Image: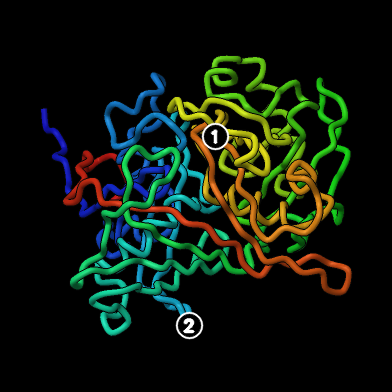
Amino acid sequence: MTHTPQIKIPATYMRGGTSKGVFFRLQDLPASAQVPGAARDALLLRVIGSPDPYGKQIDGMGGATSSTSKTVILAKSAKPEHDVDYLFGQVSIDKPFVDWSGNCGNLSAAVGSFAIASGLVDAARVPADGIATVRIWQANIGKTIIAHVPMTHGEVQETGDFELDGVTFPAAEVKLEFLDPAAEEEGGGGAMFPTGNLVDDLDVSGIGTLKVTMINAGIPTIFVDADAIGYTGTELQDAINGDAAALARFESIRAHGALRMGLIAHLDEAAKRQHTPKVAFVARPASYVSSSGKNVAAGDIDLLVRAMSMGKLHHAMMGTAAVAIGTAAAIPGTLVNLAAGGGEKSSVRFGHPSGTLMVGAQAALADGAWRVTKAIMSRSARVLMEGAVRIPGDSFSA
């Protein structure tokens, strides 16, 4: 019996923020996967090890969580004033699809480093020592991200003393600027608040009417008060991820919110759009013990936030959701802003399951509409392994 041999594809396995993913240069992919379509999706699914009915992704590079079932494709940018085009694919764990509807803010921290090391940034723009400014075009949502990448002796500096809750070891700090983060391609005709309201009444079947803030910034996100759905905002993953009924309620909120935001036309379409929108619940500050055993004091944070990602409570916070948090916090009257005490805010530190994170945003009210010019936060990134991934040659259409 003839067997199709495996093929090798150059790739780098990287951590960016609190996520991990497999990074590719577009030019290194097989020709049929260099364009969007079924061949590309099939290839990435096989690389990650999906769909896996066991939910473990044992036969691939995925780590069986939404934070570790990710892929990135980079290319030199054809966009003026940009260095690199960044395309993110969120790979479903148990279903055969790749969601291209949003960005990964955590892996954004690794894009600049990979681009420099892979020769995708003009060498004349990269200092031997100091900070390299990498201008990234986020192709999923059509937005600009500026990454400030530390350089030492002509190489990307990855080690350092910057600590990020949710990541075990310190590393070099990478500062990110998400410019004009309101997601124009998503629903709502380009509006940051797709309904035109800072707070809406959302009718959810089986739950009732909830007060929500729905925002397109960083990633489309639906915020709800923790106490309205029976939580305190201090929950860790085990309190929710083992509760099938709770997960079903969150998915129902997500589906109804997606419909209201104009992201889907029918409720049943939400199942094919797992990556967006996100659902998060917020609460006033309270003390709790993080998943690592660290004590988080109420006096050290402005608010509590817990967020769902791909149907589960996230172990820390998605970077794009952090952008949404910072943006909503900067606008007086949103549920996020009210949980943080109300009033004008240029930055907030919020508590998440793994600890705390600070995010800033610059907001202004002009002609009766809110606009955020940029959101800012710090992450870190590191190469974990580089070389090539192998997949059976018949696992995609060549």
In the picture, the quarter occupied by the N terminus is top left
Left or right: 45 in relation to 376: left
Seen from the viewer's position, the closer of residues 343 and 272 is 343
Vertical comparison of 253 with 396: above or below: above
Q: Amino acid at mark 1?
A: Met
Residue at 66% x, 19% y is: 246
Front residue of this view, candidates 99 and 147: 147
Q: Are marks 1 and 2 in contact (CB under 8 Å)?
A: no
Does dot 2 land on a helix, a strand or a loop?
loop
Q: Position of residue 176 (x, y in %)?
A: 48, 62
In the structure shown, which secondary structural element does the residue marked by tag 1 occupy?
loop
At which x and y percent is residue 137? 48, 69
**Which one is earlier in the sequence, the residue at label 1 or at label 2?**
2
Label 1 neighbour load within 10 Å: few <14, some 14-19, many 20+ = many
Q: Which residue is mark 1?
A: 310
Farthest residue, direction front: 299
Q: Position of residue 115 (x, y in %)?
A: 32, 66
Above or below, 48 relative to 376? above
Q: Quadrant of residue 331?
A: bottom right
Residue at the extreme left of the image, as rendered: 1
Q: Amino acid at mark 2?
A: Pro
Q: Residue at x 46, y 35 (%)?
A: 66
Question: Label 1 to label 2, Cα distance in Å?
Answer: 34 Å
Provide the residue designation for mark 2.
80
On residue 16, the disc is: none
Q: Residues within 10 Å of mark 2 (few under 14, many from 20)?
A: few
